[in-house]
Image: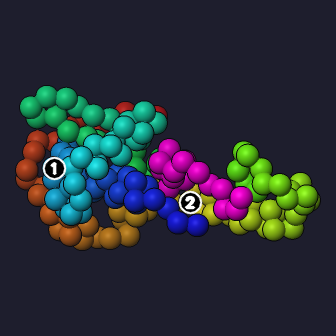
Amino acid sequence: MRLTKQTNYAVRMLMYCAANEGHLSRIPEIAKAYGVSELFLFKILQPLTKAGLVETVRGRNGGVRLGRPADKITLFDVVKVTEDNFAMAECFEDSVAECPLVNSCGLNSALRKALNAFFDVLSDYTIDDLVKARPQINFLLGIDEARAPRLAAVPAA
């Protein structure tokens, strides 16, 4: 299984916002930190906003911030809103293949078990875990602590 670039950069965007806690993060700054286009990040922003993982603030001094605390956003939360398909084999798809074993196949059962284990592991890790694992993340991402005034705390969900 391979996650899409959308999921990869969605996690990165959330990590940036978590590392920049108390400040609004701007898409151009996030794009520059990761070397990706702003347009791509704006595309990713839509499902994250719809799911409540991020909030956007419009206006001249607007930007993006986490929609809930970083320790309440799991990797599974991100993956389920950014991935379109978890079909690991043809028989996982809605339009089932013409295999006579589809309902009693050992492969199908094994792959479902593996997929559920994958989801369980993703559920064990939060954005906060990823950020705290890298003490120098602000430096690595070029986040300047003195750049903007602190925001009011984001209410807990």
In magenta segment, residue 84: yes
- Determine the image quadrant of residue 92: bottom right
Q: Amino acid at mark 2?
A: Leu
Q: Amino acid at mark 1?
A: Pro
Q: Which mark is residue 1?
A: none
Q: Which mark is residue 28?
A: 1
Left or right of 146 on screen, residue 27: right
Dot 2, crowdedness within 10 Å: few (<14), some or many (≥20)? some
Left or right of 10 on screen, residue 80: right
In magenta segment, residue 24: no
138 to 60, vertically: above or below = below
Q: Helix or strand or loop: what does disc 1 sit on?
A: helix
Q: Quadrant of the N terminus?
A: bottom right
99 to 69, vertically: above or below = below
Q: Helix or strand or loop: what does disc 2 sit on?
A: helix
Asked whether 133 or 99 is in front, the reply is: 99
- How far across and down, in percent of the image, does residue 85 sit? 59, 51
Dot 1, crowdedness within 10 Å: few (<14), some or many (≥20)? some
Left or right of 43 on screen, residue 101: right
- How far across and down, in percent of the image, does residue 48 sit? 40, 41
**Chain-order first, disc 2 or disc 1:** 1
- How far across and down, in percent of the image, does residue 82 sit? 47, 48
* Magenta residues (range): 75-90
Q: Residue at x 38, y 70 (%)?
A: 133
Q: Residue at x 49, y 62 (%)?
A: 3
Of circles 2 and 1, the one toward us is 1
- Determine the image quadrant of residue 62: top left
The residue to which callout 2 is attached is 122
In space, the residues marked 2 and 1 are separated at their CA atoms by: 28 Å
Does the image show residue 22? no
